[in-house]
Image (cartoon, rainbow, N blue to C red):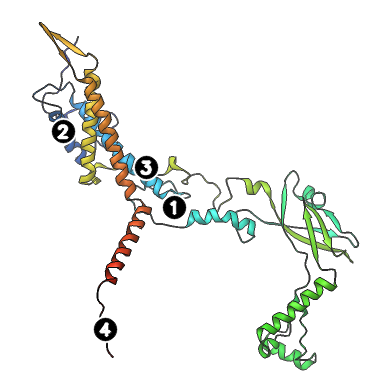
Amino acid sequence: MANIPIWPGSSSFGAVTDPTPFGFFDTDNEFTSSADKAANWCARRLGYPITDVELQDINFYTCFEEATSEYGNQVNSFNIKDYLLELRGAPTGSNLTGKEISNNLGQVITLAEEYGVEAGVGGNVTWHTGSIAVTESVQKYNLDTLFRDIYQPNKQIEIKKIFFQQTPAITRYFDPFIGTGLGSQGMLDNFGWGAYSPAISFILQPMYSDLLRMQAIEFNDTFRKSTYSFTLINNQLKIFPIPTSDYNLYFEYIIKSDRSNPIKATNTTSTDGVITDFSNVPYNKIEFVKINDVGRQWIFKYTLALTKEMLGNVRSKYSSIPIPNAEITLNGADLLSQASEEKTALIEELREHLDSMSKRNLLERKKEESEFLQEQLNKSPLNIYIG
């Protein structure tokens, strides 16, 4: 068996070629200066120089790099989870590591646009306009054959609005208080209301009088006339009353495939290059130099746990080593068990710290502080001012 050198008691990061497997932090001066300190600390925690440590400097550097990378991964994962709603749709070209993310309603409004489509007040699905020719004395019309098959073949459409309604009551408003002569019309024109209903009564009479009169007109249409109405079932249109002349009937509709399409049209020609999910949020590795003392302490502890795991694997290759008249039992299994417990505990501790600083928890804490402060102030005597 080859005589492989083990930890000699010191190391020099700069003297080693390719000291870490990935080289993520090899140009970070804070990382390179801390690597040898971390190696020396881990070796002493493992019993050196009382006992040999069957590792080399590059093994310590590897664990240190992995611990630093793991810390950044946990922090970045938390930030992505906490801010994904604000980040979706933003460009992927900018590095968000270390950047303050502003709260915004962009994605909330995007979610609400789906409801806007159905309500006809906006949204991300285009409303199209169409029309059919209404024929005198014909009540029923198949919009699929008369319109869809001609203008939107092989597509399913959904009618959203049909412009078939009685003339608004306000335009048929008769005001007995102003007469119908040229004088009254001239007065309307002078007010700028010549094209509308007799608006002078809006000034001379209370509002409820106008509302009652318009309601009377609408009730008259409903009870005494065949009021304008229609039924629409599966794009089969039936209109009331029976048409007495030929005219064009207009309507608005959507294409069903547009609504069910998960990739809606946007202001850009493509959705490439924007944040869509957890996988492409541009959080890069956190530089070691920008990690505070609290984070570095976690990294050192996680480095030790990884070192124990590596040393445990080495020592587990042989459970014991024979010597004259006896044998030495190695503690590989104990090191692996300790490493697993320490790694799990450190990850859980870090995640708990991060979760306690989420937006929701910070707002809840702020709410509690304000309530406690208000309760304390309520118990303080107030000054009485005498004027």
SS state under label 4: loop
Reply above or below: 195 against 230.
Answer: below
Reply above or below: 37 against 151.
Answer: above
Viewer-side label of 2, 1: 1
Judging by the rendered image, the residue that carries numbered circle 1 is 86
Spatial CA distance of label 3 from label 2 is: 29 Å
Spatial CA distance of label 3 from label 1 is: 15 Å
Could you say where residue 121 lies in the image, as x and y percent from the top left?
62, 61
Q: Residues within 10 Å of mark 2 (few under 14, many from 20)?
A: many
Sequence-earlier tag: 3 or 1: 3
Spatial CA distance of label 2 from label 1 is: 41 Å
Sequence-earlier tag: 1 or 4: 1
SS state under label 2: helix
Q: Residue at x 75, y 91 (%)?
A: 178
Identify the disc placed on residue 384.
Answer: 4
Sequence-earlier tag: 3 or 4: 3
Sequence-earlier tag: 4 or 2: 2
Q: Are marks 3 and 2 in contact (CB under 8 Å)?
A: no
Spatial CA distance of label 4 from label 2 is: 68 Å
SS state under label 1: helix
Reply above or below: 133 against 314.
Answer: below
Could you say where residue 62 lies in the image, as x and y percent from the top left?
25, 29
Q: Residue at x 78, y 77 (%)?
A: 217
Could you say where residue 154 lies in the image, as x and y percent from the top left?
74, 43
Spatial CA distance of label 3 from label 4 is: 55 Å
At label 4, which amino acid type do we have?
Answer: Ile
Left or right: 272 with respect to 318?
Answer: right
Reply above or below: 322 against 78.
Answer: above
Judging by the rendered image, the residue that carries numbered circle 2 is 36
